[in-house]
Amino acid sequence: MHALTDKVAIITGASSGIGRAAALLFARNGARVIAGARRQAELDNLVAQIRAAGGLAYSVVGDVRDESFAQRLVQRAIEQFGGLDIAFNNAGITGEMGPTPGISAAGWQEAIDTNLTSAFYGAKHQIPAMLEKGQGSIIFTSTFVGHTVGFPGVAAYAASKSGLIGLTQALAAECGPKGVRVNALLPGGTLTPMAHTMNGTPEALAQVASLHALKRLAQPDELAQAALYLASDASSFMTGAAMLVDGGMSINRT
Ligand code: NDP
């Protein structure tokens, strides 16, 4: 018996980084996975890898900015696996960065739509399916940025990601009486394509690593392990939390 035996899990942002690592880890732990993102080839590769290891997975290609994508993910979970237990709403972008007076309205909106409105769409369609089962775990990937740490040049990212924490608290209060838990995962710097986009040079990556108490960036699997904890019954009394898994970024002053 594994931590997620017979559980059905939607994971967005599964084509890369933290989401991909979580899809592989959840499947290894017995979950039946519905993997979502825009890039078909990457999802095909992931699904093949899960199946080769004896797991069960399907992909759904789409854009988290479309409400219909959230709907299709839930429909697929119900059609293929008979319901939904876990949703790791993890897809995200850094969006337009730089001094705020230079940020375009479209750049601002893209970050809000991709990082925050997507989470509302996800929850809106995931909650009814979880209520059918009388239980469930919803996880949003937020960040320390805009919550415990202020950085210049990331206004849209920080605002969209801290909005997820308000959403987490509201939904946790709303859904708790019905057995559905809602938590936010707040990673520190993690070695994924996003980290390379945000920090273009090895020197910049090393500088960010040095801001963490552990003096390194995380491997995607270390965040996947934290998501597994929030998804599983190991965290059965946890809801409404903003869980920092940030290598000490938030408390470090050296
Ligand atoms: P990656 O860039 O490796 O992965 C991002 C994922 O999001 C991809 O699978 C991408 O898939 C998907 N995605 C982006 N936009 C959309 C969209 N419009 N529709 C559907 N899918 C989309 O980044 P990470 O793994 O690092 O990021 C995962 C989450 O972790 C993000 O929410 C990020 O903000 C957060 N985070 C990351 C940190 C880090 O240091 N890496 C630190 C703190 C938080 P595709 O392009 O195929 O659509």
Image (cartoon, rainbow, N blue to C red):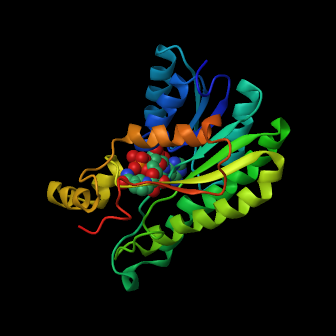
Residue at (24, 56) in percent of width and height: 209
Q: Position of residue 29 (x, y in %)?
A: 55, 24
Q: Position of residue 221 (x, y in %)?
A: 40, 37
Residue at (46, 60) in percent of width and height: 143
Q: Is residue 240 visible?
A: yes
Residue at (64, 23) in percent of width and height: 5
Left or right: where 94 falls relative to 32: left
Left or right: where 175 falls relative to 72: right
Query: Which residue is at the front of the view, 110 or 2?
Result: 2
Q: Is residue 196 above or below residue 41?
A: below
Query: Which residue is at the front of the view, 2 or 51?
Result: 2
Answer with the quarter of the image where residue 118 lies: bottom right
Answer with the quarter of the image where residue 208 lies: bottom left
Q: Quadrant of the C terminus?
A: bottom left
Query: Which residue is at the front of the view, 41 or 2?
Result: 2
Q: Is residue 30 above or below residue 246?
A: above
Residue at (33, 75) in percent of width and height: 98
Q: Is residue 232 visible?
A: no
